[in-house]
Image (cartoon, helix red, strand yellow):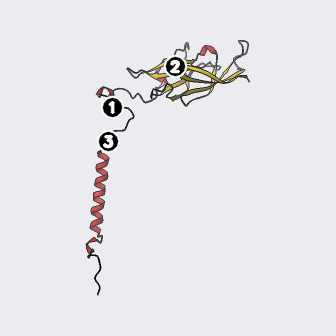
Amino acid sequence: MQHPAVPDLSHTHARPIHWVATATALAGVVALSSVLQPDAATAAQAAGSERKNAPALTAPPDPAAVAFPLECGPVKAVVQKKASGDLDGDGRPETVAVVHCDAPMGTPPDGVYVVTRGADDGKPRVVATLVKPGERRTVTDFAVRGGAVRATLLGYSSADVPSCCPDVTDEVKWQWENGAFVRDTPSQARTI
């Protein structure tokens, strides 16, 4: 009879008690790892304890918490559309809101406002007006992409054009440049 070249490994055969012990150890590791989690990762360096009690400055500001510079008389201002993104490159998102008065009839003109959070208290506030309601414009397509605000504006070629029937369409884009929003009209105004 020939002896094997390796020693007898009969003690390596798995028995049910081995499987139970392995399963118990694995369950313990999983349970322990769920309790001992590291803090959430952030791109910014951690500040002192005063930062932990401050509002999250990385969340886009809510335009519903802002009083817009819009005269609506007895009706309220309504946020019709909103979009968020980092427009000025500071790492904190801004929200752009299309707002108009909640008129019972007709289509009131829109205002387009940029809302950001105050660095000191984190409260939302209006920092720029891109379209004033006095311009008698209606915003249709609207988005924030690539750090720019893009919109389609419907308007009027003269004061003689009835409010029901805008006859001018502008495709516009606003980009943050040298501390201000600069308006660019990629395609010239066209009559509908």
Categorize mark 2 by other alpha carbons within 10 Å: few (<14), some (14-19), many (20+): few
Write down the residue under mark 3. Answer: 38
Left of 114 or right of it: where is 165? right
Q: Where is residue 55 shown, x and y percent of the image?
A: 38, 27
Write down the residue under mark 1. Answer: 46
**Type of the residue with mark 2:** Asn
Residue at the far front in the pictured view: 5
For residue 76, say whether it is visible.
no
Q: CA distance from mark 3 to mark 1?
A: 14 Å
Q: Are marks 2 and 1 in contact (CB under 8 Å)?
A: no
Residue displayed at 28% across by 54% down: 28
Q: Are marks 2 and 3 in contact (CB under 8 Å)?
A: no
Q: Where is residue 153 shown, x and y percent of the image?
A: 65, 23
Residue displayed at 39% across by 29% down: 56
Categorize mark 1 by other alpha carbons within 10 Å: few (<14), some (14-19), many (20+): few
Write down the residue under mark 2. Answer: 178
Q: Nearer the viewer, mark 2 or mark 3?
A: 2
Q: CA distance from mark 2 to mark 3?
A: 40 Å
Work out whether residue 147 or residue 60 is closer to the camera in this orientation and state it: 147
**Type of the residue with mark 3:** Pro
Left of 107 or right of it: where is 64? left
For residue 47, say whether it is visible.
yes
- SS class, disc 1: loop
Q: How many callouts does the rendering have?
A: 3
- SS class, disc 3: loop
**Type of the residue with mark 1:** Ala
Work out whether residue 54 or residue 103 is closer to the camera in this orientation and state it: 54
Considering the image in quadrants, where does the N terminus appear? bottom left
3 or 1: tag closer to the N-terminus: 3
Q: CA distance from mark 2 to mark 1?
A: 29 Å
